[in-house]
Image (tube, helix red, strand yellow):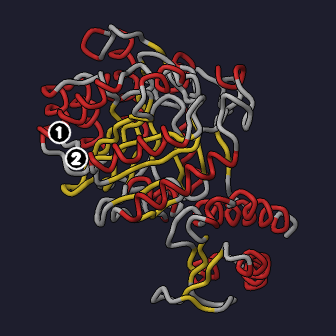
Amino acid sequence: MNSNPTIAKLQPSLSLEDVEPPKSAYLHIPFCRRRCFYCDFAVTVVGDRQQGDNSTMIQDYVDVLCQEISQESLIFPATSLNTIFFGGGTPSLLSVDQLHRILNTVDQKFGIANTAEISMEVDPGTFDQEKLQGFVDLGVNRVSLGVQAFQDHLLKLAGRSHTVDEVFAAINIIEKIGIQNWSLDLISGLPEQQLKDWEFSLKTLLNINPNHVSIYDLIVEDKTPFSRYYTPGEYPLPSEKSTTQMYRLAQKLLTQAGYEHYEISNYSKPGFQCQHNLVYWKKQPYYGFGMGAASYLQGYRLTRPRKRLDYYAWVNGDYPDDMSEFVDTTQEQLLETLMLGLRLSQGINLEDLSQQFATEVIKKIVTLLIPFYQQGLVQFLDHHHNLIQPNFHQGLIRLTDPDGFLVSNEILSTLFAELSEL
C-alpha cells in the first residue's frame, strides 16, 4: 500500500498530539443513476442498471476509499466516532457487502461508538426491503430520503430518476423495517412549481409524518443544465416573491405540526436533530473521505479531487498537492463562525465568541446587528432564552424565524463587508 504524501504533510503542520481528534466522519459515495439537472456535486453517473453488486466501477471505488481511510488512520490519533454520514451521490447504490467493508474499515482504523449516529442518504428506486434491512443490520440507524417533490412532472423537469410511486414504495419499506430516525427532503423553487404544488407536497409530507425534514430552496449553480436553461427569478422558475411564500408556508405548516425549525433548512421532531450536520454548523472538526470530500481539523481544510480518477491518483500519491486550503487567520475563522452559527435557531453564544476573538470585534458585530434588531430580523437572548436588549458581553444572537432567515444573506453580507476590514 502506497503512503499518501499529501496526507502525510498534515502531520508536521498541525501538532496533532496536542489536539482532540474529530469524532465525526463524512464518506462520499459519488455514484448516481443519472445526474439531476440542478446538481453540481462530485458524482459519477452509472445508469439505471448498475448497482454495487454488479458494478466493477463501484467496487474499485470502495477499494480506494478503504485505502484512503486506512492511510489517514496512520496520521491521526485513534478515536471513537460519534457520527458517520454516507452522502453522495446515491449511497444506497452500494451493496450490503460493500457497506460492510467500508464500516468495518472505519471501525478497525478509528473505532465507532456503540451509540454512534450512522446516517445514509437513500434515493427511491435504489433499494428494496432486503437491502435496506441489510444496511440497518450493519448499524445504519438514520436515513435521509431524497424525495424533492410529490409531482411526477416536477421530478422529470428536475432530472430525478424516480417517480412518485417509487417514493411511496420507499417510504413503505422504511416503515416496514421500523426506522424511526429518518428524514424526508423537499426542494422549493423548481421549474414550473407553483405555490399550490408546494402546499400539496408539504401536506403530503405531514401525512407521512417523518421525524426530520430538510427543505432546500433551489440554487441555480454554474455549469449545471439548469444554469443553461434558466435565469433565477424568470419563468419557468418561480419568482423571488413565490419562493419567499414557499419558505413561509413551510415554516408555518411544519412548526404548527410540532417540528422544531432548528436550522435554516432543517426541521425535526424533539430528539431527532441530525447530530452529524450539527458538527458542521457548530464548526467542530470532522474527517472527510472520498472523491470531492472535505475534512476539517484545527483550521486546516483539505478537499479531495472531484474527479474519480484524479481522486484515485491522489490517494496513491500521484496527483499534484494542490487540494489543501488553510482557514487559519483570525478573520477567516470569525466569518465562518458567523456564517455557520447564524444558520442555527439557537444562534451564536457571545461568551463563546469572546473566548476566540477580541472584545472590540464582539462590539463591532453587535453594533452592526442593531439595525437588523430594530427591524425585527435579529434577536438577543439571555441564557434562559428570554428576549433582552442588545448586549455586548453575554447571551445569544440569533436570526428571527422566518423573517431573519429569509434575509440571512443580506445580514451576512453586511457583516462580511465590515468585518473583512478588521
Q: Which mark is residue 136?
A: 1
Label 1 crowd (10 A; few <14 / some 14-19 / many >=20): some
Label 2 and label 1: CA atoms lie apart by 6 Å
**Residue 162 badge:** none
Residue placed at 35% from the left, 29% from the top?
A: 123
Q: Amino acid at mark 2?
A: Asn
Residue 382 appears anywhere in the view:
yes
From where the camera sits, is residue 312 visible? no
* Residue 91 figure quarter: top left
Which one is nearer the viewer's eye here, 166 or 341? Answer: 166
Residue position for label 2:
141
Mark 2–mark 1 contact, CB under 8 Å?
yes
20 vs 206, left or right, is right
| Image coordinates for residue 274, horizontal then vertical, percent | 37, 55
Residue nearest the observer in this picture, 377 or 201: 201
x and y percentages locating residue 262 in the rendered image: 45, 64
Question: What secondary structure is found at the residue carrying circle 1?
Answer: helix
Q: Nearer the viewer, residue 402 or 114?
A: 402
User: What residue appears at the point 37 percent right and 47 percent down from the top-left corner?
Assistant: 203
* Residue 95 percent coordinates (x, y): 24, 22
Q: Quadrant of residue 138?
A: top left
Of residues 231 and 112, the one drawn nearer to the viewer in this rendering: 231
Q: Secondary structure at mark 2?
A: loop
Residue 384, image x, y percentages: 45, 89
* The C terminus, quarter of image: bottom right
Whichever of callouts 2 and 1 sits on the residue coming sooner in the sequence is: 1
Where is 122 relative to 276, above or below?
Answer: above
